[in-house]
Image (spheres, grey):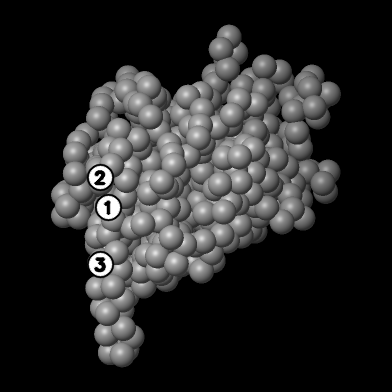
Amino acid sequence: MYVFRSLSLLFLTVAACTSPPQGGEDVRISVLDGFIREALFHGRAYDRLEELCTVAPHRLSASTDAAAAIEWARATMEKEGFENIRLEPCVIPRWVRGATEQLFVVEPKEHAGERLAILALGGSIATPPAGLEADVIQVQNFEELTRRAEEARGKLVLFNRPMDSRLVDPFQAYRGAVNQRAIGASKAAAVGAVGAICRSMTTRLDNVPHTGGMRYAKRVPRIPSAACSTEAAERIAGWIDAGKRVRLRMVLNCREEDPVGSFNVIGELTGWEKPEEIVVVGGHLDAWDVGQGAHDDGAGCVQSIEAVSLVMRLDQRPRRTLRCVLFMNEENGTGGARAYAAAHGAEHHVLAIESDRGGFTPRGFTSDARGEVFDILQSLVELQKRTGAEKLISGGGGVDISPLAASHVPLVGYLPDAQRYFDLHHSASDTLDEVNERELALGAAAIASLAWLVADLPETLPPNPPR
Ligand SMILES: [Zn+2]
């Protein structure tokens, strides 16, 4: 251990002497190696994550924990010595989970009184105080719901299409199922249903429900909406398949209040040559109110802070400004993302990188970059592949940076190995002990590397060409 640390110190000294870099490939690779060593030997990301999960574990937008997370972020950026630290205002919804979330079996009679695990979906209205009791109809998709519209009237609709576990990409599986959660309630209400329950968005079979955002359509009655655990969904399906009548009673006392003011937290390392040109690295500070939001998106926040900090600790101030943006309200409204785009959309953003797919082992990056811009980014990802983030594939950058696409800013999403992400996502299982310190650190080094390479290019990365 001592030998390695000594080598690391020697290396850091060498790396520090190279600033500002001359752009040669060897020099750049040695700087990137420095990020990796510093992240692994003296990394702060995991300790920062532990702090965040301790001071603000349930940081749903507009909650007291969200306010604590904002203060933690500001204070952490100060400790790191970031420049131009500020809180920037945004307006966000305030939805409050109730103390009561229950789903009882009424029929089949032999299971009457048993409880099934649910969580209200963010944005849902409450049930009447005594609960809402109705027969259950199970559907796999909206087409089946439309076909069976008559049957669904007056019922509780169970949307029970699983995430497709045959797909290699778990995000693809998520995207293929999540419409049931996001808009299922209004689809059900449109055919006269009285409540909606969706199977949790996970491929895992367990008794842990996963919450998430939902939104009501205009001109359709609002009905209560919850997610049940995959085990609960399987039990209900089993009764229905056996020809039994299923009748349930759901009690939710969540509520939506008036929107409130909140903040994005921003800090920078100003560029030495072209400070007005900006590379954003960011994640979202809010999280669902169950678990600790350790992967979603505490990991992205501490990686974004650590990425800028690594560049500072190695004394590698780049030509352009690195801006760490911790967005508020990604989960249920994107108020922070819209406020950032409104305030800064006209600035010269060279690139925006978002980390919001968990803090797992680095695999690469996704990007909406096209043509020459994609090729340049790919050549830079090549340089830093020792972190394991070695591929650049076409895809989105992330929810919070997505409004910048309108200004032709190339967007990049950090891509870890997310095979276990949806085991935890939006559930009580998303806790610090599910995050691996080395995986988190390597991800921070990968993000630091790509951000620094782009921020220090001799020629500015061109804007993303129109589609
Ligand atoms: Zn997230």
Relative image position of residue 6 (x, y in whole percent):
27, 85
Relative image position of residue 121 (x, y in whole percent):
50, 36
Pointer 2 with pointer 3, Cβ within 8 A? no
Q: Nearer the viewer, residue 428 or 407?
A: 407
The residue that disc 2 covers is 272
The residue that disc 1 covers is 317
Of marks 1 and 2, which one's residue comes earlier in the chain? 2
Pointer 3 with pointer 1, Cβ within 8 A? no
Q: Nearer the viewer, residue 171 or 88?
A: 88
The amino acid type of the residue labelled 3 equals Cys
Establish if 367 lies above or below 10.
above
Q: Residue at x 47, y 62 (%)?
A: 25
Q: Residue at x 60, y 13 (%)?
A: 220
Of marks 2 and 3, which one's residue comes earlier in the chain? 3
The residue that disc 3 covers is 17
Q: What's the distance in space between the residues labelled 3 and 1, CA to CA?
A: 12 Å
Relative image position of residue 48 (x, y in whole percent):
28, 59
Task: Tell me the element at label 2.
Answer: loop
| Residue 361 in view, yes or no | no
Q: Is residue 145 found left or right of 402 in the rendered image?
A: right
The amino acid type of the residue labelled 2 equals Trp
Q: What's the distance in space between the residues labelled 1 and 2, CA to CA?
A: 7 Å
Task: Tell me the element at label 1.
Answer: loop
| Residue 76 in view, yes or no | yes
